[in-house]
């Protein structure tokens, strides 16, 4: 059967008869979904269970939405409901250690009990059960699962005209021609995918936001989006343009000064208007004073003044304001040795710790620059003990091959989430900071930039969907094993045939190291063209106003970020970490050029020189990319034709483009340094 990818990992492909028959016949005839209304996620859970069980196991169960005496006389069901609904049944009262959105899943033979702390949790439990049986796992289970962090959101950079900034999968599913789209079918299908990996919130428009997001017409459209996503427990919010009310926006106030009473009143009224129509509205995301966006600094107000303006308007309704820490000067001069874009987030935000209201979350990109192939964790994570924080990750592969290259990104995310900041010389993993655990914050979590589009496979590449799947699962449990998450996704998406699982595992796990090898090593960043596409190789394009510098000349390369002689960035980390990065000897090879400026002939811990490492890594990485094609071809006949061909096309492109990358980068540094490749490859084609 041809498969266009629309159902993603929720295919519910039917299991072979031999595998499913015995279990299917042990199931009770009835699903009991204890929902309040038909827009409740519990109702959705009932439908999903019915549909999933029928498609996976070939048996159609009936659904009852109440637990009547006639049903209770029957001893077993597939039962799904909230904790309070379950406890009202009276038969037994459950006292489990539940966090909001958490669930309890009990499988005993054919009897299945799914209890959510709330309605959303009940739906998550249903998806968990379906994920197990879809993978042929019929084992008894008794699990309580709670989220590590309350905020598990996605961000979409969709514009109102239907284009998507850094989107690689077609036009917007949310907007067209300046308005919310008329047909929101894809939006509810997307909500279903998101809910199945326990995402609970979405920001639907670009952080470079249009003031027209706040017109009455758009708000009516946003209500329709919220209605489409509510049955899946997804709360909806928008990015705001800070200047929306003012002369450059909707022209309803004379200023956009966050302390001006008319501005405060405008935001309050606007927020009230939204909540009147959408009572479960999530809140706002704000990019202020960054890359030309307006913000409070225009009026000499602090970024905290700016964030708190929205926090006050949202607070009575329980809404949240995500305020981005991606604030930096995008007009820097590479000739200034001590200037450093990597210092910006800390410089702007550290002194504001404690000044943000409780419903503000400062949303911090994982690294100090911008979604590069490897960055150290942003030092800002260590310096906001009195502020809620979230980490911003990118599923859309802006600097990672834009879905034309296979890059399974979770191994990169893990290097950040598991990084220990050693705040106060105590264990301070980034994941425990953003979850709120380290500094005892009640809010915090994850924001993932996804940028799905109208392409039937959502991201423009079937294999890229593993990143979205794993993102949700890691936001729920960042200690999850990234290879087993990947394999859950493979089995759900392509089936459990062992060679399929093995090949996709192997190429996915090899993909990030390979991509790093052929695009930018030793912490030098992804050497793409900074000015335009962020796609192909352009090592010569780095020294410009955007601050993603390499400081390469004919004999040296790397950013000196030391305190002793450079930009001082290493000193932004807590002392134990700072000491490691300050010192050339203790800096790990893969961050050498992020923190130090050295000769091309400098020897790494590996014993190689920097330049020889460049040559070897680019050849290794490109060679690895060549192996993806035959590996995939070995699956012909084991993956349906449509997806087989789509993936093959992408992997062939990647194999070719990896050679272009290899030759462009290795050749560039060969020409610049004049140092020969010991293996005689570079410059000798
Ligand atoms: O890296 C830059 C991207 C911009 C993006 C910006 C941001 C939405 O190239 O396209 O703008 O980051 O994150 O705000």
Image: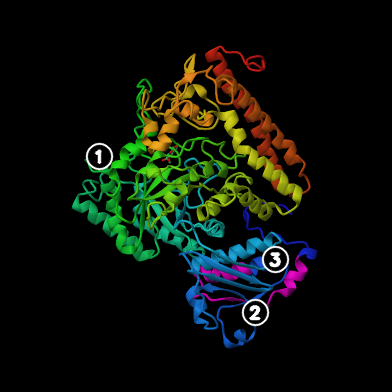
Residue at mark 1:
298
Counting from the top left corner in percent of width and height, residue 406 is at 62, 39
Question: Which quarter shows the C terminus?
Answer: top right
State which tag comes first along the sequence, 2 or 3.
2
Counting from the top left corner in percent of width and height, residue 39 is at 49, 70
- CA–CA distance between discs 1 and 2? 64 Å
**Residue at horizontal 46 percent and vertical 29 percent from the top:** 594
**Residue at horizontal 38 percent and vertical 41 percent from the top:** 380
Q: 94 or 361: nearer the eye?
A: 94
**Residue at horizontal 66 percent and vertical 55 percent from the top:** 492
- CA–CA distance between discs 2 and 3? 17 Å
Q: Are marks 2 and 3 in contact (CB under 8 Å)?
A: no
Check disc 1 and report its element: helix, strand or loop. helix
Q: Where 493 sits versus 591, above or below?
A: below
Residue at mark 2:
76
- CA–CA distance between discs 3 and 1? 60 Å
Check disc 3 and report its element: helix, strand or loop. loop
The crowding category of the residue bearing disc 1, from other C-alpha atoms within 10 Å (few below 14, some 14 to 19, many at least 20), is few
Q: Is residue 7 within the magenta segment?
A: no
Which stretch appears magenta? 20-49
State which tag comes first along the sequence, 3 or 1.
3
Q: 393 or 254: nearer the eye?
A: 393
Q: Is residue 374 left or right of residue 681?
A: left
Q: Nearer the viewer, mark 3 or mark 1?
A: 3
Give residue 138's mark.
3
Check disc 2 and report its element: helix, strand or loop. loop
- Quadrant for ligand 1 reads top left
Q: Nearer the viewer, mark 1 or mark 2?
A: 2
State which tag comes first along the sequence, 1 or 2.
2
């Amino acid at each position: 059967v041809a498969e266009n990818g629309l159902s993603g990992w929720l295919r519910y492909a039917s299991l072979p008869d031999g595998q499913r028959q015995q279990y299917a016949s042990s199931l009770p005839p009835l699903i009991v979904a204890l929902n309040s209304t038909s827009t409740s996620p519990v109702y959705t859970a009932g439908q999903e269970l019915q549909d999933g069980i029928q498609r996976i196991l070939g048996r159609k169960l009936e659904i009852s939405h109440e637990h009547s005496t006639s049903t209770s006389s029957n001893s077993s069901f597939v039962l799904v409901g909230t904790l309070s609904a379950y406890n009202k049944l009276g038969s037994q009262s459950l006292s489990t250690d539940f966090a909001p959105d958490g669930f309890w899943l009990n499988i005993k033979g054919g009897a299945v009990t799914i209890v959510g702390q709330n309605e959303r949790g009940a739906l998550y439990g249903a998806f968990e059960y379906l994920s197990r049986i879809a993978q042929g796992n019929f084992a008894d289970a008794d699990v309580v699962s709670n989220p590590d962090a309350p905020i598990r959101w996605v961000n979409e950079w969709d514009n109102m005209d239907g284009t998507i900034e850094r989107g690689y999968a077609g036009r917007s599913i949310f907007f067209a021609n300046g308005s919310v789209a008329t047909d929101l079918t894809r939006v509810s299908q997307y909500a279903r995918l998101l809910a199945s990996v326990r995402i609970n919130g979405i920001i639907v428009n670009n952080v470079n936001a249009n003031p027209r997001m706040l017109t009455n017409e758009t708000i009516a459209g946003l209500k329709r989006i919220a209605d489409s996503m509510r049955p899946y427990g997804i709360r909806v919010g928008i990015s705001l343009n800070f200047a929306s009310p003012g002369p450059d926006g909707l022209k309803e106030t004379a200023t956009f000064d966050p302390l001006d009473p008319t501005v405060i009143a405008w935001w309050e009224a606007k927020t009230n208007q939204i909540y009147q129509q959408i009572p479960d509205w999530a809140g706002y995301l704000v990019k202020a004073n960054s890359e030309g966006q307006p913000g409070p600094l225009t009026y000499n107000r602090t970024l905290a003044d700016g964030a708190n303006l929205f926090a006050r308007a949202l607070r009575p309704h329980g809404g949240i304001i995500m305020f981005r820490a991606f604030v930096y000067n995008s007009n820097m001069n590479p000739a200034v040795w001590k200037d450093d874009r990597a210092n910006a987030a800390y410089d702007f935000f550290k002194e504001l710790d404690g000044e943000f209201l409780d419903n503000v979350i400062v949303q911090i990109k994982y690294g100090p620059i911008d979604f590069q192939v490897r960055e150290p964790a942003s030092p800002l994570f260590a310096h906001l003990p009195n502020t809620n924080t979230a980490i911003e990750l990118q599923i859309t592969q802006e600097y990672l091959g834009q879905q034309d290259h296979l890059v399974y990104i979770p191994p990169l995310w893990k290097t950040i989430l598991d990084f220990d900041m050693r705040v106060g010389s105590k264990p301070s993993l980034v994941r425990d900071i953003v979850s709120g655990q380290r500094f005892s914050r009640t809010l915090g979590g994850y924001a993932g930039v996804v940028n799905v589009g109208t392409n039937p496979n959502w991201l423009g590449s079937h294999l890229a969907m593993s990143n979205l799947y794993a993102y949700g699962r890691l936001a729920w449990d960042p200690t999850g094993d990234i290879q087993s998450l990947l394999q859950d996704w493979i089995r759900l998406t392509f089936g459990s045939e062992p060679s399929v699982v093995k090949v996709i595992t192997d190429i996915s796990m090899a993909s990030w190291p390979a991509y790093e090898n052929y695009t930018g090593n030793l912490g030098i960043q992804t050497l793409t063209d900074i000015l335009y596409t962020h796609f192909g190789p352009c090592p010569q394009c780095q020294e410009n106003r955007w601050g993603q510098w390499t400081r390469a000349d004919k004999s040296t390369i790397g950013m000196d970020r030391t305190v002793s002689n450079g930009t001082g960035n290493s000193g932004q980390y807590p002392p134990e970490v700072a000491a490691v990065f300050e010192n050339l000897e203790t800096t790990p090879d893969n961050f050498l050029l992020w923190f130090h400026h050295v000769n091309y002939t400098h020897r790494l811990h590996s014993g190689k020189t920097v330049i020889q490492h460049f040559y070897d890594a680019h050849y290794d990485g490109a060679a690895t990319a060549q192996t993806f094609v035959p590996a995939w071809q070995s699956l012909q006949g084991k993956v349906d034709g449509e997806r087989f061909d789509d993936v093959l096309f992408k992997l062939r492109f990647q194999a070719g483009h990896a050679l272009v990358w290899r030759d462009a980068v290795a050749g560039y540094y060969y020409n610049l340094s004049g140092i020969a490749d010991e293996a005689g490859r570079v410059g000798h084609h």
